[in-house]
Image (spheres, coloured by chain):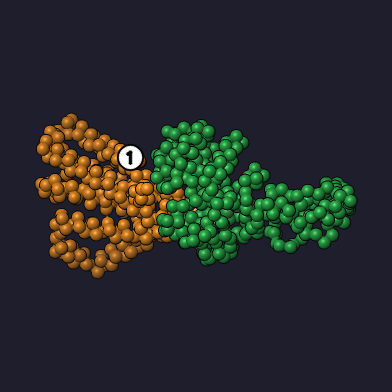
Chain colours: A orange, B green
């Protein structure tokens, strides 16, 4: 008898469109357009923001996955715990696969000097020559962070509904806006900038910081789902 | 051990009671009918029973323990509802594959058999199915799961009479092969009344009837005949409702008619007959004020 967490993971895994085909279709179509530009216009060594498409997609996937599967899973009498664990396992697996693909493509890009046309599509800023291992890790963390960001929004919606989500974003805007206003009014920007400069994170440190944020998001999302209900 | 046990279960939304102090015990391996009008609280009750909704107060136990995040208890429950949502890209076979790995007693044979009987295309996306076919998917999961506690909430929306017959026949067959606790919530009371062993009737969140189906047959009756004679007969009896057509009156009466009553009705020239389950439900839940024990 299979564990129910594994069943949830396999339930997600069945949906290859959401997790693999669509994000890669989006990414590759952006790549093809940029490659065509490289062929036709022949600019020298150009970078694109095309990589953002898969990151944004992961955010959306995180939001949508709960809407798509939470009531189905609970309707089949799966616990919230199993649902969460299985979802994270499946998403983690697909994200790892995507990160590996991205790293391989980055290596190819570097080996072919930008696909023969000087196109830097899979390159992350500050990561041009730090090796495939670090690139893979960074891709993985970035995708994971975006996914859990989406999952948290999705869970918030599931737990508190439309009003809850609206209220949250309103509160977040107020807090952040208020903070910005205070810093501006007190003329503290120089201090904030200086503080950030002094921290001087390396790429590796930044990824671990992101990982910590991801874990917090995961915990928040789980706690929200634990009290989420299925009405009808 | 009881399959399900509710004690003083109340679920309210901003002061409104969707469920109001429900106490009941479901025994193992029986077929229960959960009846009541739309919005009476049947669906809410089943959601609380499966920990999809949280009770405001009261106690919920499934196979002896609280179902919330309780994998051992939830593994024994299969809840089929009319409003079940399915993932966007899922095909019928995907749903069955997921369900089959969830339920330890899943019968692939039953699923196969029912797919054929309902003529359900396995590779079709669930999103694209007609209402009736969608109901068939739920019924297949519910019966093939062979779950110790199987809840069917209006499982046959959009199904034609033939398909409903398939459901009833397979339900009985499955139950005979492997007894389990089945809860059937239904509007088509006359159709299912033969299947039900025990009846719960819910009205406005309150449990107003908790009785063996057998006993219910002797619990109420109707008398019909000339209005004056019927009225005379009714003196002192607990009347549920009256329908008058010209000088002809038909009354539904709560209580046991008994041999004496039957004889009395006969000598008065009245027709007396047990009230069907559907008529009883209509009489008990049809009035605006709500049913009160011993009223009218």
> Closest to the observer: A230 or B276?
B276
In this view, A35 is above or below B9: above
- Number of marks in picture: 1
Q: Chain of mark 1?
A: A
The residue pinned by badge 1 equals: A16
Q: Quadrant of residue A226?
A: bottom left
Visible residue check, residue A160? no
What residue sits 15% from the left and 50% below the top? A134
* B94 lies left or right of B264: left
Quick one: SS at disc 1? helix
What residue sits 77% from the left and 59% below the top? B238
* B6 lies left or right of A47: right
What residue sits 56% from the left and 57% below the top? B26
Residue B12: horizontal and vertical position, in percent?
54, 62
Residue A57: horizontal and vertical position, in percent?
30, 45
> Closest to the observer: A37 or A96?
A96
Tell me if mark 1 has few (under 14), some (14-19) or many (20+) residues whose alpha carbon lies within 10 angstroms of its own.
few
């Amino acid at each position: 008898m299979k564990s129910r967490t594994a069943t949830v993971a396999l339930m997600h895994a069945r949906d290859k469109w959401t997790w693999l085909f669509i994000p890669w279709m989006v990414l590759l179509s952006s790549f093809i357009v940029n490659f065509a530009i490289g062929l036709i216009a022949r600019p020298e060594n150009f970078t694109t923001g095309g990589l953002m498409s898969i990151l944004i997609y992961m955010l959306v996937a995180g939001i949508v996955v709960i809407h798509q599967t939470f009531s189905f899973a609970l309707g089949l009498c799966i616990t919230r715990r199993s649902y969460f664990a299985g979802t994270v396992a499946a998403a983690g697996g697909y994200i790892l696969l995507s990160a590996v693909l991205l790293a391989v493509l980055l290596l190819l890009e570097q080996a072919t000097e930008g696909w023969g046309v000087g196109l830097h599509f899979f390159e992350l800023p500050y990561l041009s020559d730090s090796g495939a291992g670090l690139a893979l890790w960074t891709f993985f963390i970035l995708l994971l962070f975006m996914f859990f960001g989406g999952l948290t929004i999705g869970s918030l919606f599931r737990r508190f509904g439309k009003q809850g989500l609206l209220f949250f974003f309103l509160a977040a805007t107020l807090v952040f806006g208020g903070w910005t206003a205070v810093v501006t009014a007190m003329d503290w920007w120089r201090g904030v900038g200086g503080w950030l400069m002094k921290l001087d994170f390396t790429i590796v440190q930044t990824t671990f910081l992101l990982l910590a944020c991801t874990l917090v998001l995961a915990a928040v999302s789980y706690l929200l789902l634990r009290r989420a209900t299925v009405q009808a | 051990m009881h399959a399900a046990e509710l004690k003083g279960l109340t679920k309210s939304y901003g002061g409104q009671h969707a469920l109001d102090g429900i106490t009941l015990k479901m025994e193992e391996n029986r077929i229960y009918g959960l009846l009541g009008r739309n919005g009476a609280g049947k669906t809410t009750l089943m959601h609380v029973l499966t920990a999809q909704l949280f009770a405001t107060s009261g106690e919920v136990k499934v196979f002896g323990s609280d179902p919330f995040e309780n994998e051992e208890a939830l593994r024994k429950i299969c809840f089929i509802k009319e409003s079940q949502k399915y993932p966007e890209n899922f095909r019928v076979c995907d749903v069955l594959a997921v369900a089959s790995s969830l339920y330890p007693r899943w019968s692939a044979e039953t699923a196969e058999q029912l797919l054929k009987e309902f003529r359900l295309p396995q590779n079709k996306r669930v999103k694209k199915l007609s209402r009736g076919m969608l109901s068939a998917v739920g019924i297949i999961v519910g019966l093939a799961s062979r779950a110790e506690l199987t809840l069917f909430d209006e499982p046959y929306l959009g199904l034609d009479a033939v398909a409903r017959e398939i459901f009833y026949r397979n339900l009985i067959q499955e139950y005979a092969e492997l007894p389990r606790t089945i809860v059937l919530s239904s509007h088509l009371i006359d159709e299912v009344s033969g299947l039900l062993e025990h009846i719960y009737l819910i009205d406005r969140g309150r449990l107003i009837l908790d009785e063996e189906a057998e006993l219910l047959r002797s619990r109420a009756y109707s008398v019909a005949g000339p209005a004056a004679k019927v009225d005379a007969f009714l003196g002192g009896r607990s009347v549920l409702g009256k329908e008058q057509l010209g000088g002809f009156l038909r009354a539904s009466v709560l209580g046991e008619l008994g041999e004496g009553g039957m004889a009395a009705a006969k000598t008065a020239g009245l027709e007396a007959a047990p009230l069907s389950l559907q008529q009883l439900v209509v009489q008990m839940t049809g009035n605006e004020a709500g049913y009160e024990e011993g009223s009218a």
